[in-house]
Image (cartoon, rainbow, N blue to C red):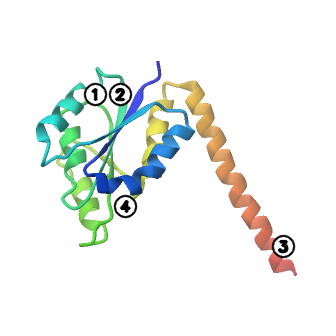
Amino acid sequence: MAQKVAVILGSDSDLPAMESCLRTLKTFQIPFEAHILSAHRTPGEAHDFAANAKANGFGVIIAAAGKAAHLAGVLAAVTTLPVIGVPMKTSMMGGLDSLLSMVQMPKGIPVACVAVDGGENAAILAAQMLALADEGLSERLAHFKDDLSAQVLEKDKKLQEGLAQ
């Protein structure tokens, strides 16, 4: 059975920004679970989830959080699985506060980090990690990259045609 991705939201308010993540995981046919767990309000549950994630069939954890954004680091502290942090945009600093709290992890507890509200890229990065051991997923990623290239080349063709007129 394919490894699953865990998508952990620090709050239900993170869901709208993370819908693209869930959609992208579905597009790549990656099984996933999504949960709301807080580093500060449900620390025991967050700890238990991460500590047991590998045994429960997960291969990657994606953690979305805003403001203090300690969720990704708390999860990474108790698992050997890769953790991808998605800093959420905030009213205070536009998400810079969330971003900095994720990327400034102490030595030995790495968290990969994508852009503020970068749920789609988090899903793609998770897919790339899982594709190292899943040839079918690797092929789906290759097609995805080919489609991205074709889209850009089509836009360039339209630009060139417009400039020639």
**Of the numbered discs in the image, which one, if any, rests on residue 53?**
1
Residue where numbered disc 4 is placed? 116
Q: CA distance from mark 4 to mark 1?
A: 25 Å
Q: CA distance from mark 2 to mark 1?
A: 5 Å
Kindly identify the residue that appears in the image at 28 percent across and 20 percent down: 55
Tell me the quadrant of the picture where the C terminus can be found.
bottom right
Q: CA distance from mark 3 to mark 2?
A: 48 Å
Q: Which amino acid lies under the numbered mark 2 shown in the image of this protein?
A: Phe
Which is more N-terminal, label 1 or label 2?
1
Please determine whether, in this image, residue 63 is positioned above or below residue 163.
above
Q: Secondary structure at mark 4?
A: loop
Q: Which amino acid lies under the numbered mark 3 shown in the image of this protein?
A: Glu
Image spot of residue 97 (x, y percent) = 24, 65
Q: Secondary structure at mark 2?
A: strand
Q: Is residue 97 left or right of residue 86?
A: left
**Of the numbered discs in the image, which one, if any, rests on residue 58?**
2
Which is more N-terminal, label 3 or label 4?
4
Q: Secondary structure at mark 1?
A: loop
Kindly identify the residue that appears in the image at 43 percent across and 39 percent down: 126
Residue where numbered disc 3 is placed? 161
Which is more N-terminal, label 1 or label 4?
1
Q: Is residue 159 left or right of residue 37?
A: right
